[in-house]
Image (tube, coloured by chain):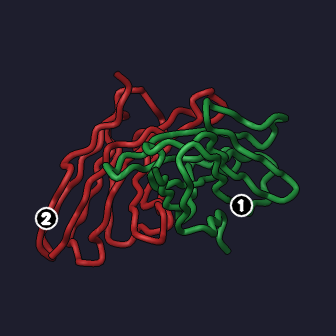
Chain colours: A green, B red
Amino acid sequence: AQKITQTQPGMFVQEKEAVTLDCTYDTSDPSYGLFWYKQPSSGEMIFLIYQGSYDQQNATEGRYSLNFQKARKSANLVISASQLGDSAMYFCAMREGGSARQLTFGSGTQLTVLP
Amino acid sequence: EAQVTQNPRYLITVTGKKLTVTCSQNMNHEYMSWYRQDPGLGLRQIYYSMNVEVTDKGDVPEGYKVSRKEKRNFPLILESPSPNQTSLYFCASRGFPGQTNEKLFFGSGTQLSVL
């Protein structure tokens, strides 16, 4: 079974609007971490935001926030006030417990910001 | 500057010709790993290492070898490359779980083409 599911292969958003990228996860481990990474066309992987399973509040980093709904096992990324430079591939990822295997990634969502 | 350095950035080779992709990190991280990225599949882990001389298979280890003789270096070896190993490869590292630096640090990627 897929551990990380991103159901939106592609998304479009108008500049300055907010956009939500969906991510659902599957784990039976009570301790886990959820990550979002951005990959622009240049190819590098850029860390955006992290949410731990025991964190009481949703994580925020500037224009990025993580809408963490533990019961639903979802960890959606919200980008406020989209900019043209936000056009990129976005990956959701999970680390389970103290797993040394590091991260399991979803298949990604290609976001295009329209002027 | 904290970084993960991967080389080469681009590599074109022929079937069966052994190659090595190098990876080095300057953050004294214990954990290092290799991922491959293919369209529609996200990033999949090839091998990982918890420390010097400790390595284990990830999700797609067939056709790859690794070694961890020094803490900073984690080369990826393709003994007999085949066309299905054409992919974008990333090296990544992080410290022990529980530290505030939960995130993976990624190298800039190696685009490999096997003809």
In the figure, is residue A104 to the left or right of A42?
Answer: right
Q: Position of residue A73 (x, y in %)?
A: 79, 58
Amino acid at the residue labelled 1: Tyr
Tags 2 and 1 on a common chain: no
In the figure, is residue A81 to the left or right of B36?
Answer: right
Using the image, name the chain to which the residue with label 1 belongs: A
Image position of A10 with respect to B26: above or below: below
Amino acid at the residue labelled 2: Ile
Image position of B35 with respect to A35: above or below: below
Which residue is nearer to you in this view: B69 or B2? Answer: B2
Q: Report the residue marked by disc 2.
A: B12
Label 2 neighbour load within 10 Å: few <14, some 14-19, many 20+: few
Label 1 neighbour load within 10 Å: few <14, some 14-19, many 20+: many
> Residue furthest toward the front?
A115
Image position of A12 with respect to A1: above or below: above
Report the disc number at residue A25.
Answer: 1
Q: Position of residue B48 (x, y in %)?
A: 46, 52
- Marks 2 and 1 sit apart, C-alpha to C-alpha, by 36 Å
Using the image, name the chain to which the residue with label 2 belongs: B
Which residue is found at the position 55% from the left and 39% from the top? A48
Task: Say what secondary structure mark 1 lies in.
Answer: strand
Which residue is found at the position 68% from the left and 39% from the top? A65
Q: Position of residue B37 (x, y in %)?
A: 40, 62
